[in-house]
């Protein structure tokens, strides 16, 4: 698999000192990567494309690289009790460790960000095999999460050196997932602006939109959110923090169970959300529920859409509109036993926003789940 699997920017952004071509991969540390990979292959339609582990000479971990469209997930399990990966899983449960960013020059990206105050997690390293070379370098972001810059312009292998292409004979059926739309981070109370400033000052991102507790609240709880984006718009990171409320917000619940800041959800794009969500439901993926009354004012609130409203209603898909178009979205329940990481499925019909009109219904849905867990 070459870099042709990812979109290159249409045009460079002159003021963007850190050009990003998109998300390269997302690495999840998990207790049993073999079983987790089966879940993502069977339920979400990913295909296994590469593997690293004892059979390939790697002694401390096993990693399965899955792909669908331009989305790569890496699922990694430690093989020994006394290492950083094992401690990460004990502390956080299964969760996102690496948000990897595809760049043309990993060394330049690392030098530029560390010069602006980023804390290095790994100095530039060149990995080589018979398919060429990949350069990687990493910096820390919120919590224990890191960004890894990946330069793969001189590589033609399945993933990167150290990983072997693999086909175990289990062919999965993709469900139409295309690329990572955005990744949302939850941070502790009072730290949202700190991390927004990090992305602005260290990585050259721009503040795209702000939501306060008047936008995202119910009778019981609230949150604040700011969305930052790189110059090309290919990489967007909403950052949430809890706001004062009568009861515990979803952000506080996440931070309590994840034991700190981390990636809350991964939003993945589709061009046919009815097919994608229909398949996910058929394969056993569970979603947050909004009551049928949500759909009563859709014709007046959203206006005309191409999709069949009854089909969207049957699948419980949310709808919102902004000045540039509309979007369709739905959120899974947490995919781990801890109420932490979940996925969003999103289809954009021109809309650039994040579903502000759905926030109240979504928040109330999450609160119902919190109440069932005894965490509201």
Image: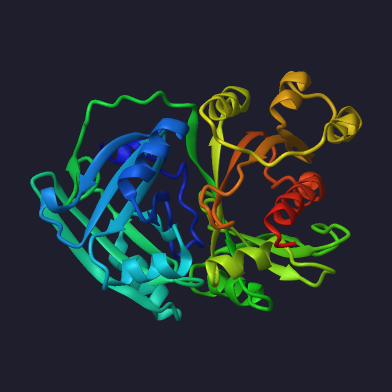
277 vs 360: above or below: above
Quarter holding the C terminus is bottom right
Q: Can you see residue 45?
A: no
Pick the residue in front: 323 or 276: 276
Where residue 27 sits: x, y (%)?
A: 38, 54
Using residue 64 as the reference point, say whether residue 140 is left or right of it: right
Quarter holding the N terminus is top left
Using residue 372 as the reference point, say whether residue 120 is left or right of it: left
Label count reads 0
Q: Residue at x 33, y 67 (%)?
A: 86
Q: Quadrant of residue 318?
A: top right
Pick the residue in front: 297 or 182: 297
Where residue 142 sits: x, y (%)?
A: 51, 71
Q: Residue furthest left?
A: 130
Q: Residue at x 38, y 71 (%)?
A: 139
Pick the residue in front: 217 or 148: 217
Q: Residue at x 17, y 51 (%)?
A: 161
Q: Residue at x 20, y 36 (%)?
A: 166
122 vs 235: above or below: below
Where residue 143 sits: x, y (%)?
A: 50, 72
Q: Can you see residue 221?
A: yes
63 vs 242: above or below: above
């Amino acid at each position: 698999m070459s870099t042709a699997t990812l979109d290159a920017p249409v045009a460079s952004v002159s003021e963007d000192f850190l050009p990003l071509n998109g998300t390269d991969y997302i690495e999840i540390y998990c207790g049993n990567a073999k079983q987790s990979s089966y879940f993502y292959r069977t339920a979400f339609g990913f295909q296994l494309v590469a593997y690293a582990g004892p059979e390939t000479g790697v002694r401390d971990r096993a990693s399965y690289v899955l792909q669908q469209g331009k989305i790569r997930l890496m699922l990694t399990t430690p093989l020994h009790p006394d290492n950083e990966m094992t401690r990460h899983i004990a502390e956080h449960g299964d969760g996102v460790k690496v948000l990897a960013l595809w760049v043309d020059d990993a060394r330049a990206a690392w030098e530029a960000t560390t010069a602006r105050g980023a804390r290095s997690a790994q100095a530039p390293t060149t990995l080589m095999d018979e398919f060429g070379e990949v350069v990687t370098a990493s910096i820390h972001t919120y919590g224990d999460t890191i960004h890894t810059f990946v330069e793969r312009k001189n590589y033609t292998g399945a993933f990167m050196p150290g990983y072997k292409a693999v086909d175990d004979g289990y062919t999965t059926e993709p469900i139409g997932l295309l690329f990572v739309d955005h990744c949302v981070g939850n941070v502790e109370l009072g730290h949202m602006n700190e991390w927004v400033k990090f992305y602005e000052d260290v990585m050259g991102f721009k503040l795209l939109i702000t939501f306060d507790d008047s936008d995202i609240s119910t009778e019981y709880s609230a949150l604040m959110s700011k969305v930052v984006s790189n110059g090309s718009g290919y990489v967007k990171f909403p950052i949430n923090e809890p706001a004062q409320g009568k009861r515990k917000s979803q952000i506080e619940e996440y931070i309590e169970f994840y034991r700190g800041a981390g990636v809350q959800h991964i939003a993945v794009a589709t061009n046919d959300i009815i097919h994608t969500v229909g398949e996910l439901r058929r394969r056993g993926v569970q979603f947050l529920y909004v009551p049928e009354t949500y759909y009563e004012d859709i014709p007046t609130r959203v206006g005309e859409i191409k999709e069949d409203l009854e089909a969207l209603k049957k699948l419980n898909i949310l709808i919102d509109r902004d000045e540039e178009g509309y979007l369709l979205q739905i959120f899974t329940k947490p995919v781990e036993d801890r109420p932490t990481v979940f996925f969003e499925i999103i289809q954009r019909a021109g809309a650039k926003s994040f579903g502000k009109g759905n926030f109240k219904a979504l928040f109330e849905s999450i609160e119902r789940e919190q109440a069932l867990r005894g965490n509201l």
